[in-house]
Image (tube, rainbow, N blue to C red):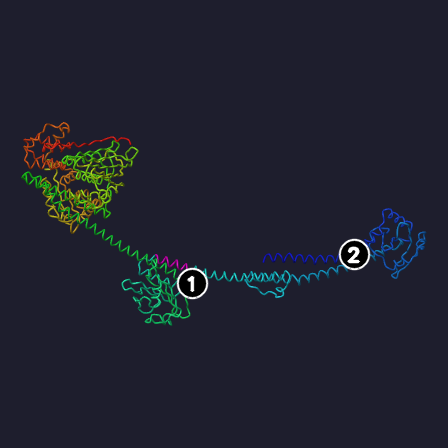
């Protein structure tokens, strides 16, 4: 259109220019043609410069009468010159009468006039003229007229004004005619087109287009036709855009509603609430008056109405079979369906009032291509229909609703599973706590009374041997129970790290004293090789590291019959260790045992799995390696095994630890002395035992009363608080699991009451570290684990109360500490020297030495009569120097001892 208008403008400009040019030519013809004729005659009659001089001389010779101007006429009756201005009036023509008069003058007259004669004439208006003929040989000028100058000029001026007026009239006529022609042929159509353009630009419609303008064959007609065609195209495109915009607005409205609906569905994870939200949002989205959601019942294999809206009457739980009605068909086909006249549809459900539903639509709810439900919308008023766009939109909405329903179902299942898992975990924790209490509490009485009886010197040799067997097997049973409980803790996710500072070298020494007698008894060599760059003091979980090393060394010695067992400790980092730095240590237990079959290696760390060698020995639970792996993983390490059948096995693991300062607390495990009483001049200590189990109260009474403690007892926490308020004991031994009021609440109440606060030592059979932390948080100062270790309990009492105990072997031990020989400077004990002791005593001492039980060995040595004090001193020295192997050699000289090697070696660089 723009190009058309530009083309029209160019053609119009050309036409207007043409008309203007024609007008100018006409005017110029009117003005210029006469001038041209004059000019032509002027050129014919022009004089050269010397002729002008002669003309001037002629005017002087004529000397007419009066003051008059003189004119020189040529044959063409044109003024050539006058006496005032030679060329100024050359274009004006004189009156025709005068010219005729001059022309009638004979040549002879003209000739005569040249000699001085003249002719006078008066015209009708009274103007007087005088003619003087003049002739020469070089010119055609015939007449010299001498006239009155003012009169001639008036005539000339009058003629000029007439010509100007005539020309102006012609110009005005041409201009008006041109304007009228241009206006009729061009301007009016252009104004009409301009009005249409403005009208179309303002309101998008045309006020009307002149049919003549459209039917014209010129450029304006082409422009008008193009404009009308363009307007039609624009109107058509505008209509399309309006329709598309309306559809887009509807789509945006649907999408906004869909988004709001989706957010609403996502926020509901309860199935019932979600269904109500879906059906209400569906009706709002489509504008329907009624809505239904049917869900598939797997057991009945039908569709059950789960929720509805806008329906009168109770249709809840209404059921539809496959293929029955619209819902059943959508269920079968899995495709959306709609019926405008549901009330006249012959396949509708017959027991539903058809007047309630007019147009109805249903779409499936799918999960993984399986129809799990149907959602349906309906209008109750006739005349309404569901469009294809609404069905498509509702189908998309149903897809989102299906996802929301599936998420809600999964959430419900996950919540149920989580609740079941939490319940199972809680039940397992309760079971563990209960089993820990129920299993360890009886062992507390068994092992506790065994320790009490072992201190009785009035028992016979057989009785002592029986007690030792009871104590040893009780400890083995306790270890088994601890393994089972520890594995249960691991499975329940309740195992955590409890780091402390300890001396690694001392731990290795204690391990050597624990296992070397067992190794010697089997004829094995035990080596502990520790790299010189391994830091001595560490900050890590000492208990778990010790347990892993005990498990691995115990298995190695148990399954190895000949050869050796070696524990290697190395620093795996390239940089040397320094205080506070993080280091990684590597441990390896190497044995020369039977080895492990290759197909058994993948299952070796599985709980309760035993290799063939373990099954043949019929010993162990198969939990030691599984527990070790979990402990190593907790310490940021990993454990692996390499084995060759017939050559042996290598168990390797690494841990991460922090280098501690040299002030780290030393590891326990040294020999203990038996408490027989309190030192003289000690204060009177009052002690309260709060324990619900009578046998445990009796055990503590048997242990504490003979030492001189003033002892009180209570059977639950409430009685314990009352007893504390009455007697104000300095120390309370508080069981944590009791009826009426447990130990946790009792400790809190005591701490909350203020006043003189006692020392509270918790008595607990729990194996959970977090339980121990809870005991301390409740107000307890320390924890003593069941089964009670008597010497451990006495150590805690001495630590908190400052009690000074008297030990059964204090004199002998003091002597041994001052004059203890080294392992290579033993005095001359002979096997015969031990024959002074009873056979049961020698057998018990051999068993204690073979098992590495230094405590029991010292207890037996303490029973040596004073007459054999020197022998007792020597035996005690061997125990203090970890040379229980020498005791075995003295008891069984027929067996050749195998030297245990404990070395700190510098590793060769790789």
Badge 2 or badge 1: first in the primary sequence: 2
Residue 778 is at least partly visible in this image = no
Please identify the quarter of the rendering in which residue 146 is found: bottom right
Provide residue 554's location: percent of width, then percent of height: 18, 39
Q: Nearer the viewer, residue 831 or 592?
A: 592
Position of the C terminus, as image quadrant, is top left
Q: Which residues are magenta?
A: 253-266
Q: Nearer the viewer, mark 2 or mark 1?
A: 1
Q: Residues within 10 Å of mark 1 (few under 14, many from 20)?
A: few
Please identify the quarter of the rendering in which residue 877 is found: top left
Mark 2, residue position: 33
Residue 469 sits inside the magenta stretch = no
Q: Secondary structure beneath disc 1? A: helix
Please identify the quarter of the rendering in which residue 3 is found: bottom right
Count of numbered badges drawn on the protein: 2
Q: Is residue 102 left or right of residue 242?
A: right
Q: Nearer the viewer, residue 852 or 760?
A: 852
Image vertical order of residue 347 relative to residue 477, above or below: below
Provide residue 421's location: percent of width, then percent of height: 25, 52
Residue 442 is at least partly visible in this image = yes
Mark 1, residue position: 389
- Badge 2 vs badge 1, beta-carbon distance below 8 Å: no
């Amino acid at each position: 259109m723009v190009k058309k208008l530009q083309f029209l403008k160019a053609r119009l400009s050309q036409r207007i220019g043409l008309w203007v040019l024609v007008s100018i030519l006409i005017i110029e013809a009117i003005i210029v043609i006469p001038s041209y004729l004059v000019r032509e005659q002027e050129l014919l009659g022009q004089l050269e410069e010397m002729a002008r001089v002669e003309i001037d001389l002629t005017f002087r010779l004529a000397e007419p009468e009066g003051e008059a101007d003189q004119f020189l006429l040529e044959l063409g009756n044109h003024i050539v010159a006058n006496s005032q201005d030679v060329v100024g009036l050359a274009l004006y023509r004189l009156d025709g009468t005068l010219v005729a008069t001059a022309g009638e003058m004979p040549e002879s007259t003209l000739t005569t006039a040249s000699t001085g004669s003249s002719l006078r004439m008066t015209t009708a208006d009274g103007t007087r003229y005088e003619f003087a003929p003049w002739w020469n040989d070089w010119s055609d000028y015939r007449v010299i007229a001498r006239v009155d100058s003012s009169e001639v000029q008036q005539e000339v001026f009058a003629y000029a004004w007439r010509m100007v007026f005539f020309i102006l009239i012609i110009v005005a006529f041409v201009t008006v005619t041109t304007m009228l022609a241009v206006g009729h042929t061009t301007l009016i159509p252009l104004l009409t087109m301009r009005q249409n353009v403005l009208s179309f630009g303002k309101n998008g419609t045309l006020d009307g287009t002149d049919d003549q303008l459209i039917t014209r064959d010129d450029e304006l007609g082409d422009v008008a036709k193009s404009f009308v065609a363009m307007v039609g195209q624009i109107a058509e495109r505008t209509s399309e855009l309006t329709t598309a915009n309306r559809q887009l607005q509807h789509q945006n409205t649907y999408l906004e509603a869909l988004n709001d609906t989706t957010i609403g569905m996502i926020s509901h994870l309860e199935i019932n609430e979600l269904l109500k939200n879906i059906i209400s949002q569906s009706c709002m989205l489509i504008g329907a008056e009624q809505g239904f959601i049917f869900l598939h019942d797997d057991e009945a294999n039908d569709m059950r109405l789960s929720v509805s809206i806008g329906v009168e009457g109770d249709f809840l739980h209404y059921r539809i079979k496959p293929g029955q009605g619209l819902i059943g068909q959508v269920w079968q086909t899995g495709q959306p369906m709609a019926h405008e006249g549901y009330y006249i549809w012959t396949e509708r459900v017959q027991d539903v009032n058809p007047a309630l539903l007019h147009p109805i639509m249903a779409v499936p709810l799918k999960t993984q291509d399986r129809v799990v439900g149907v959602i349906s919308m309906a209008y109750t008023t006739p005349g309404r229909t569901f469009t294809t766009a609404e069905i498509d939109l509702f189908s998309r909405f149903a897809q989102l609703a299906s996802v929301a329903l599936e998420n809600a179902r999964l959430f419900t299942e996950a919540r149920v599973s989580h609740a079941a898992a939490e319940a199972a975990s809680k039940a397992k924790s309760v079971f563990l706590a209960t089993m820990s209490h129920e299993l360890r509490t009886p062992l507390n009485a068994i092992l506790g009374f065994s320790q009490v009886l072992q201190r009785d010197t009035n028992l016979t040799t057989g009785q002592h041997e029986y007690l030792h067997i009871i104590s040893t097997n009780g400890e083995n049973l306790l270890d088994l129970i601890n393994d089972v409980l520890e594995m249960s803790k691991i499975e329940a996710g309740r195992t955590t790290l409890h780091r402390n500072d300890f001396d690694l070298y001392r731990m290795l020494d204690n391990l050597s004293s624990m296992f070397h007698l067992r190794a010697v008894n089997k004829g094995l060599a035990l080596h502990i090789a520790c790299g010189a760059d391994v830091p001595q003091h560490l900050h890590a979980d000492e208990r778990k590291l010790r347990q892993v090393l005990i498990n691995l060394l115990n298995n190695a010695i148990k399954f190895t019959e000949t050869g050796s067992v070696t524990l290697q400790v190395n620093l795996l980092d390239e940089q040397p260790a320094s205080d506070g730095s993080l280091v990684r240590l590597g441990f390896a237990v190497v044995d020369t045992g039977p080895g492990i079959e290759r197909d058994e290696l993948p299952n070796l760390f599985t709980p309760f799995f035993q290799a063939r060698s373990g099954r043949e020995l019929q010993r162990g639970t198969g939990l030691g390696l599984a527990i070790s792996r979990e402990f190593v993983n907790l310490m940021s390490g990993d454990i692996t095994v390499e084995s060759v059948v017939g050559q042996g096995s290598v168990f390797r693991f690494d841990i991460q630890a922090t280098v501690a300062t040299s002030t780290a607390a030393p590891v326990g495990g040294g020999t203990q002395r038996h408490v027989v009483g309190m030192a003289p001049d000690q204060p009177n200590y009052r002690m309260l035992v709060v324990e619900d189990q009578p046998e445990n109260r009796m055990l503590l009474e048997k242990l504490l009363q003979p030492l001189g403690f003033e002892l009180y007892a209570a059977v639950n926490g409430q009685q314990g608080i009352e007893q504390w308020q009455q007697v104000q004991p300095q120390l309370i031994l508080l069981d944590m699991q009791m009826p009426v009021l447990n130990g946790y609440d009792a400790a809190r109440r005591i701490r909350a009451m203020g006043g003189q606060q006692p020392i509270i030592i918790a008595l607990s059979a729990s194996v959970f570290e977090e339980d121990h932390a809870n005991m301390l948080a409740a107000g307890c100062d320390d924890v003593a684990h069941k089964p009670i270790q008597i010497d451990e309990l006495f150590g805690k009492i001495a630590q908190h109360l400052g009690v000074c105990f008297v030990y059964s072997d204090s004199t002998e031990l003091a002597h041994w500490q001052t004059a203890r020989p080294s392992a290579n400077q033993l005095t001359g004990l002979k096997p015969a020297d031990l024959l002074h002791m009873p056979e049961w005593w020698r057998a018990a001492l051999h068993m204690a030495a073979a098992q590495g039980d230094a405590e029991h060995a010292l207890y037996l040595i303490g029973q040596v009569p004073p007459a054999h004090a020197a022998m007792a001193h020597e035996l005690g020295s061997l125990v203090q120097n970890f040379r229980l192997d020498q005791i075995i050699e003295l008891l069984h000289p027929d067996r050749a001892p195998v030297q245990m090697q404990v070395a700190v070696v510098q590793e060769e660089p790789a």
